[in-house]
Amino acid sequence: MPRTTAQHERSLEDPAVCELLKIRDFLDNVMVRTDGCYVAGFRVQGAVTYFSDDDGRNEAKGVVESLLRAMPEQSMRVQFRYEVVESLNGLLDQYRDATRSETPEARILDDRRLAAWEEKERLGAYLSRISGVYLIWDPVKHKRAMIASGGPQSKDDRRQAGGSFTLSVGKAIQKTKKEHLDTLAEFESIISGIESAMKSGGLGPERMTHGEIFLEIKRAFNPMDPDLTPLKENIAETREISARERLAPGNILGQTETYLNIDGMLWTFISLKTPPDGTYPGILRELMTIGFPIVISTQVVVPDQRVVLDKYKKKFRKMQAAQKDSKGNLRVDVTAQVATQELIQIQQEIIASSVKTARVSVVVGVHTSAPAWSAQQYETAERELAHRRQQILHVVARMNGARGFSESLATRRLFFSTLPGLAEDDRRDHDLLTPHAADLLPVELPWAGTTRSPLMLFETPYRQLLPFSPFDPNLENANAIVAATSGTGKSVHVGKMLLTCARQDVQVSIIERGDSYYHPVTFMGGQMITMSLDSEQTINPFDLEPGQVEPSNDHLAFLKNLTRFMIGDSGEGDTDLLDNLIMNAIRKTYARAQMRIDNPIPLYSDLYDELQNYYDEDKNPRVNEAARIAAAKMRAWVNNGMYARLFDRPTTIDMSTPWLYFNVEQLKDDPKLEVAMSLLIAYTTTKRAQGRANKRCITVLDECWALLQSPSLAPVVVQLFRTARKRNACVWGISQAVEDFTGTPDKPNEFGAAILATTAVKMIGRQKGNYDVLRQFLHLNETTLNRVKSLGMTEKGKKSEFLIVIGEKAETTHSLYIVPTPLEYWLLTTYPRERWYRQWWLATNPHLSLVERYEELANKFPHGLSELPELPEERSGEVSRLGDHAPVDTGKRSPTPNGGATRNEMPEWFVLEGATV
């Protein structure tokens, strides 16, 4: 910034910023530069190899290297641009747009999440990674290369290759529409080949339109406060405004020997002065994950290989001459001998077309995190920039012998050269073979999540906010397995996901032996149902879907398996005969019930009567005897039997309630009953979404390993996972270890493979014991297994860590931080001290509504109580004596005229966790 009158007068003679941009126009999905080059841009997802092993990274490197060898020589310059910005790049706006629920509870939870994320974004806690590939093609050089190689040529080609010199400025900068379309068609044919190579390399290219290229250059010019005005004319304009004028939203306020000042943001650049002695895949990873805003621009040009060979031949002759003295006798020169061997090997590979040489330039740009305007802010910004510059230089020095150079006089030129699509010869390039050039391309990125469906957002160790949705169209299904040892935050993790899914108005059903989800379910207006032998709650397994007259084959198979489980297996007789007998009896039971006028839905007692009086059409006494025996074994489940209250009554539970929570804790003394009831609940709840196209259903099976131990019910569990997608539903299985689903390598579970095949999402927490299960059944490589072994300890009230694995590819593996908001944490915590304190707090604040009580508790202790000393109310014993208190009215009376109560403000009796509702 000029500080004297003389400096100000000189600054007036400097060209405008827009005049420094070598851009002519944006049209037809390309950018045309003033030097005649055509530019096409691609957004790329990158080679996601953070969790790949050595073989996977080498394979990805080989595909990228083949892309470089497929580039046209001389005429094509490829710019690989990687940028890290301290913002979420509009992710929170996409998250808001994905909201579908109008319930006040879901809105309150969403507001708390967004407030926490916005505050962290303001403090620079999140980084967004933007990767792009820009193909810069010079048609004049291309024509010259074609003519030099003896290819087909026309008179116009020879004229264009000669440069079409003219004294007229207008003719020199003009091009007819036909010339433009012909050049564009030739450019598009080259682009299609390179795009297919990028797709095969797993880069996930997405072609930019010319308007998107325009916006990307504007965003890169001022990344902290981007101007998102699109490329279009305004009818109020009094003169023609060029694309360059629209493109330059900022000003260059000054330049020193160490930085460039653009609208208060200080920029500095480091170029690669000496390439590494040897490269390998992932050599740039430390630089790309350094943790502050950075721009890495790598330019690659493949020169004419014939000229390169001639150059190497000259070097080879020089090295041979260096090994002879003035009389022609051989002399020892170790340096020349090594260089001779290397030159021979390089020439052999080039002649064999296995590699090519490339001119590679790597420039790293760093800027401050906030603009500086005052003298004090400038001092702070300069220190911050100097610190970051030194960090970059040290990181480059650790790249296997590479050296960086801090730019001074060329800072402004390199800034424009690193902008998207504006790369040019910066005189910082090095001769490298394509395998080494591929290692220096900044294309390795962490998984970006399900960017098109940001249902929920997770923090990651790389300071990302990762969007994820199990219902994303790119996933084959929404089923999930969550496995982690006790105390690692499984309940908090699953509960947070369920509360986040509520923003899209899903139906939630939970089956658990316990009451971990009691508070979030009641907060969302749901119901906890405690199943016991004396319970009045019943689910009739014979219920049909609305509009159905007869059961589906899937329903018949479920009833057959459930009946077989009730009957048990004596180990004698023909199982196929019994299966066919039960299936036929179920069909006849439905047919007889349809004849009734009052209740056409059968009960288990109707099936019992059918088996008791069964008569085989072929008059086979063996079949009739098997039916009598089956009926005798069912007596405990029907009429006045021990289990009849739960299975042989019409359904009394309102299955349309959005949140249903079934607690089967009181059934644990009878394992057979617990397993049968859990499976019936799971099957019934997964069908809740059938016929409701806009309602998704999530069924959570906590500790479902007991279901898989039953030979009769395990196939039904597998069928639940298989058919959930067709019902617009999903099943989430929770357990402490993956081997609860799959078994061990020595004794595998025969149903484990089927469940894994129908489960797209696996979330792995801390594991104990043998990791062979993860290696053999989940096919995790050693890199991923080492990450599982190093998962951090759970920090109560702050975060826990899980590994998400989608499919069997390392590309869709990532480490997630589960960071609940204070309100979510107090709804989900299962830490005994916090559970008792939560009960005491809710009971002693009856004058507040339910939401207000939770919010005040969250505001008072945002990170829970695990790190706090004993509180006065705990020391006095008041909290621990809560169980001796009589029930109190904890609701807040509504001021409605009729004296009624509104949701979450209705009078309710305080219920201890685990009590029967």
Image: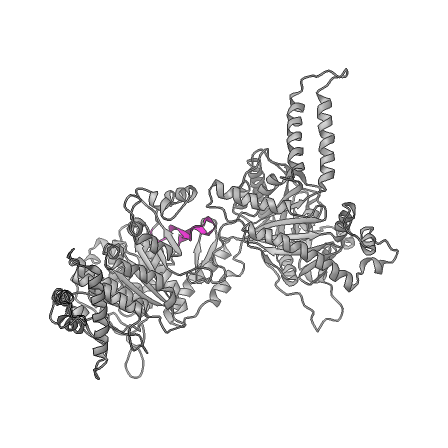
Residue 859 in sight in this render: no
Return the residue nearer the eye: 41 or 220. Answer: 41
In the displayed structure, would residue 438 be above or below residue 22?
above
Q: Is residue 320 left or right of residue 784?
A: right
In the displayed structure, would residue 344 be above or below residue 27?
above
Return the residue nearer the eye: 497 or 2. Answer: 497
The answer to which quarter of the image holds residue 475 is bottom left
Q: Residue furthest right?
A: 167
Measured from the top left, where is residue 716 in percent x and y?
A: 28, 61
Q: How is the image coloured?
A: one colour
Measured from the top left, where is residue 326 in percent x and y?
A: 77, 17
Q: Residue 538 in magenta? A: no
- Which residue lies at the image location 67% right of the left edge and 54% below the top edge? 190
- Which residue lies at the image location 60% right of the left edge and 45% below the top edge? 66
Q: Is residue 78 left or right of residue 815?
A: right
Return the residue nearer the eye: 466 or 197. Answer: 197
Give the tally of numbered discs: 0
Measured from the top left, where is residue 596 in percent x and y?
A: 21, 82
In the displayed structure, would residue 34 be above or below residue 296?
below
The answer to which quarter of the image holds residue 179 is bottom right
Magenta residues, start to end: 796-818
Q: Is residue 570 left or right of residue 512?
A: left
Q: Residue 817 in magenta? A: yes
- Which residue lies at the image location 37% right of the left edge and 74% below the top edge? 691
Measured from the top left, where is residue 199 in percent x and y?
A: 56, 53
Q: Is residue 271 left or right of residue 556?
A: right
Q: Quadrant of the C terminus?
A: bottom left
Residue 96 in sight in this render: yes
